[in-house]
Amino acid sequence: MTATPTIPPEKLDTIANFPPTAGALADVNQAFHKVYEQLAAELQAELGHDRPVIIAIEENLKLFADGTERSETYIPDDYHRLKAVCHHAFGVQLMLSSNGEGPLNDLTARRGEEVRTLIDRAVEHLQEQQLPKEGRESSRAILQLSREVITQALQSTTVQPAAVEEFARQVGPHLANNIYVATQKDLDHIHEIVSAWRQSLGETKWAKVYVVLCEGHQMRAGQATKQYFQRLLHDKDGTGGSMEDRVIYAEGCKEISAAFDLLSRHIIDQGSGRIFFGDRHRLQVDVLADAAREYLCQLLPDD
């Protein structure tokens, strides 16, 4: 028989310091948190067994199911190569714009010479870079247009904002093409991995799967991997806990244990929200939200 998971000591210490810290209400409050943490610990122990979980973390997709872990790198090399070319164009624009209008300063001139040399080398060896053919010509155009705007600035020893803006307008469609091709390659690779996992799990277990997307930065609207899993699992499109069911975005999450912890609380809160309010998302909205919205109309009435 598997031992019942216990609340980690550090969480018990945290609970003891929640206000109010003394009196009968403190005891009641701490009792609630202990029940909640115990339930979260027990639920975490179930995740990755009968309830499959896919976690995207540090460019890896990990499937936890039946007590085992499978891992695949899900961002392909094609994506990174095309992204590098796009980054280059942004770098050229930032380098020239940061100089400001007028005479080229020494730092920008030195960087311009260095970047132009790098561009020449990249164009010369572009065929060897194994870029997808759909993005090869747009990548060449980005590099050549970058070289032209840098050369113009170096020869005139000035930065003209109009020239930088014209460069951005010309390079924009090529950037858009690279972004599309990179996205296609990325999603195709994810779909190949996930489809194989789905087949191996079978539809009964697949119907229970959760996905946690771990990222170090704030959620970007329309994040591609989240879009993929939302469409695959028929989740609502949106950002934030109130718009998440089986696909959860974990901002600032760097560890698998933290992803499981977040997911367990997500499941618990949805269950309680449904029972208390008839809305499983209610506890994934700030519990003060409705009252605040109503009272702020009195506190800060419209002029």
Image (cartoon, helix red, strand yellow):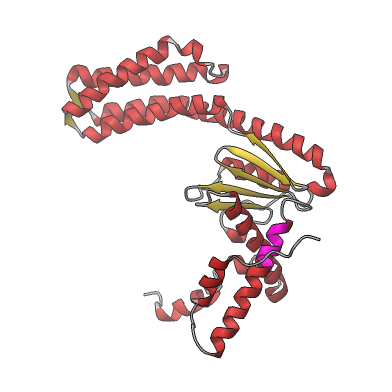
Is the residue 87 above or below the residue 39 in the image? above
Q: Residue at x 26, y 17 (%)?
A: 151
- Judge from the rendering whether residue 220 lies leftward or rightward of residue 150; answer left or right: right
Residue 254 placed where, x, y %?
A: 53, 48
Q: Is residue 40 magenta?
A: yes
Q: Is residue 8 magenta?
A: no
Residue 289 shows up from this direction: no
Q: Quadrant of the N terminus?
A: bottom right
Total label count?
0
- Judge from the rendering whether residue 163 lies leftward or rightward of residue 265; answer left or right: left
- Overall secondary structure of the magenta stretch? helix
Residue 105 placed where, x, y %?
A: 16, 28
Is the residue 31 above or below the residue 235 in the image? below
Is the residue 187 above or below the residue 241 in the image? above
- Residue closer to the observer: 83 or 137: 83
- Judge from the rendering whether residue 103 lies leftward or rightward of residue 291; answer left or right: left
- Residue closer to the observer: 116 or 13: 13
Is the residue 27 above or below the residue 1 in the image? below
- Residue closer to the observer: 301 or 221: 221
Residue 164 placed where, x, y %?
A: 30, 28
- Judge from the rendering whether residue 14 lies leftward or rightward of residue 267; answer left or right: left
Q: Residue at x 65, y 30 (%)?
A: 189
Per the rendered image, the range of residues in magenta is 39-45
Location of residue 11 by image quarter: bottom right
Location of residue 232 by image quarter: top right
Q: Quadrant of the C terminus?
A: bottom left
Residue 227 placed where, x, y %?
A: 62, 44
Farthest residue toward the bottom?
24
Q: Residue at x 71, y 54 (%)?
A: 47
Residue 199 shows up from this direction: yes
